[in-house]
Amino acid sequence: SYYMAAYIDINDSDQPDPGEDFGRYTSTALPATPIFLLPNEDFSATVEIHPNRACPNSTGTVRGEITYAGTRSGTPRIEFWADAAFTGKPLDVASLVAGFGPYSQDLCGGRPYVVRGFLDANGDRIPSPDEPQGIYGPRGQGAESVFVAPGGSADSVSFALLDPGTKA
């Protein structure tokens, strides 16, 4: 027998973590329904992922644009951190699979976030010293926090990624 489940990997840890949205295949009120397969038998089903964010307040949205004028290729990633030390794991992550341009990310509202991004040229989901990087710092004095109000939005949280050794 098999069980089928899915989750949204908010922090890109490659495993379900507390607070991440999660769903499992079930056809009854039980927690999960086993799937019995015979040799060479196929099975398809829909797995609904139910919102499960551990937000004490409602969610808010961060919107902006991420740009890059260089020649490297890869997936642009945006990370949302608790502070400018960027230690531990980000609180949330967005991968812009369509490339550079506008982004919109729902986050737990009622708290500040520090936003940084990088071009994941090697596909390892962490910024490497040779990859283009950038932070949201509109005053040019380092990373600045953005407050996301419950049910509200923080707009124009835009920044550019720069190749290593390049100044803005």
Image (cartoon, rainbow, N blue to C red):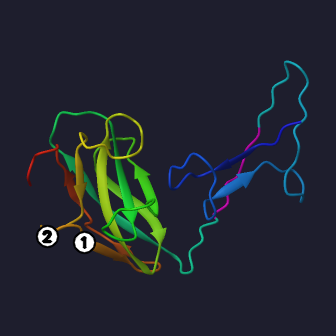
- Residue at image position (23%, 54%) is 134
Q: Main secondary structure of the magenta part?
A: loop
Q: Badge 1, how many Cα within 10 Å: few under 14, some, many 20+? A: some
- 6 magenta-colored: no
The residue to which callout 2 is attached is: 141
Residue type for callout 1: Glu
Residue type for callout 2: Gln
Q: Secondary structure at mark 2?
A: loop
Residue 95's x, y, as percent? Answer: 41, 47
In this rendering, the answer to whether 158 lies above or below 26 is: below
- Residue at image position (35%, 54%) is 78
The residue to which callout 1 is attached is: 144
Classify the position of the C terminus by image quarter: bottom left
Residue 72's x, y, as percent? Answer: 22, 34
Q: Mark 1 touching mark 2, by CB under 8 A?
A: yes
**Residue range corresponding to the magenta coloring:** 45-51
Front residue (pair 144, 68):
144
Q: Secondary structure at mark 1?
A: loop
Residue 111's x, y, as percent? Answer: 42, 79
Q: Is residue 140 left or right of residue 111?
A: left
Front residue (pair 65, 85):
85
Residue 149's x, y, as percent? Answer: 41, 80
- 50 magenta-colored: yes
Q: Badge 2, how many Cα within 10 Å: few under 14, some, many 20+? A: few
Classify the position of the N terminus by image quarter: top right
